[in-house]
Image: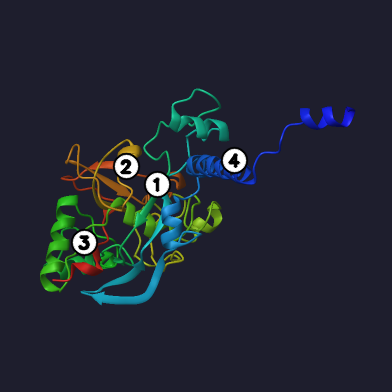
Amino acid sequence: MFCRNMTSSSQPNPPRNQLSRRRTLLATALTVLVAATLPLFWHSLGWPPLGLVLKHGLPPSGGPTGRTLNLEGVLFVELRPGYFLMGSHDLCTHGDLVGRICSPLGLPWGNQPKHGTEECPPRWVEISSPFWIAATEVTVASHQRLLRLESVAGAGNNFRNHPVCLSHLDAQRACDALSASQQFDFRLPTEAEWEYACRAGSQARFSSGDNEQQFQEMAWYISNSTMRSHAVGTRSPNLWGLYDMHGNFWEWCTDIWCADPRRLPTDGSAWTEDHAELRVIKGGSWDAPPHFCRSATRLAFSGQSLFRNVGFRPVFTLGAQR
C-alpha cells in the first residue's frame, strides 16, 4: 500500500522531445545574447572592427608592394591596402572597460572616455585601394622640372634638394602639372592616406616607436636642425621606405580642416565639408618639438598662404590611370 501511494504521487518525467526543445531554446537565447554583446565588447577593448579583421587579417596589414617609379625626379612607392588606428589617446581619457561598454549605450556607469582634442578618439580607418606615394617631399629642383621653371624665387643651388615651400593651392597646381606630363592623375594625399603611410604599421607616437632617441634618427626637428631645412632623404626612412614623414617640412593634405575626428570618414577618403580655406597639415617641421612631429599630429593652416616650412608629397591611385 505504501509503495502504491509513492508511485501514484510521483511526477512523470518530461518527454525527451520536450527536453530537447528546451535545450535548443536555451542555446538559441545564449547565441543571440553573445552575438548582440560581442561586437560591443570587442569595440570597448579598442580592437579593430571584425569586418576589417576578416577582410585584411590581424594584426593590421599593409605596407609596400616592392614596386617603385621615378617620375620627373620624384620617386614613388606603392603601398598595399590595409587598415590602421588613426589618431591618438594623447590628452584624452581612455576610461575603463565598464565605461567604454556603457558609453555607446548612453548608460552612466563606469569611467567613460573623454575627448577634447583634434586627435581623439582614435578610430580604425580602412585604406581600401593600393596607392603610390612620393618617397620624399617634393624638392625645389623637382618642382622646377614639374613646372618647367628656370628658377624658384629665393632658391639657390644649395637648396635644390630641400623641400619646396608652396601654398596648398600651388601644391595642387604642381600635382596638375605632373598629371599633364604623365599617364596618372596626381593629387595631394588624404589625411588618412598620409597617416597610414607615416605610421608604417606602428600605433606608437612615431613610426619608430615611442622612443625619442630613435625618432632623432628619422627627423630634422628643433633639436638637431640648427633651425633650418635640410635636403630630403638624409635621415633614416620609416619601415615602408618613406623619408621625412616626421619633421623637415609640414606637408599639405587634400582635406578641409575638421576639428572633431568623430565626424571624419573611416574609408580613407578626404573630408570636404566646412571651411574650405583651412587645410590639414601633417608631420611637423625643422622648427617643431617632437610633440608636433608625431604621426597623429594635425593642424589647420590657410590653404592660400605660403609658409616657410610647409611643402607636399603627391600621390596617385592605381585605378586613376588616364
Q: Earlier in the sequence, mark 3 or mark 1?
A: 3
Q: Residue 155 sits in which quadrant?
A: bottom left
Residue 295's spot in the image, x, y percent? 42, 51
Quadrant for the N terminus in the image: top right
| Residue at the image point whose x is 36% and y is 37% from the top | 118
Q: Which mark is residue 22?
A: 4
User: Which residue is denoted by mark 3 in the rendering?
Assistant: 155
Between the C-alphas of marks 2 and 4, the distance is 60 Å
Q: Quadrant of the C terminus?
A: bottom left
Amino acid type of the residue that numbered disc 1 sits on in the rendered structure: Ala
Question: Hey, which residue is sitting farthest right in the picture?
Answer: 2
Locate residue 135: give its quadrant: bottom left
Q: Nearer the viewer, residue 318 or 230?
A: 318
Looking at numbered disc 4 in the image, what kind of residue is underneath it?
Answer: Arg
Q: CA distance from mark 1 to mark 4?
A: 67 Å
In this figure, which residue is indicated by the disc labeled 1? 288
Q: Which of the numbered marks, if any, corresponds to residue 299?
A: 2
**Mark in the foreground, 4 or 3:** 4
Quote the CA–CA distance across marks 1 and 2: 12 Å
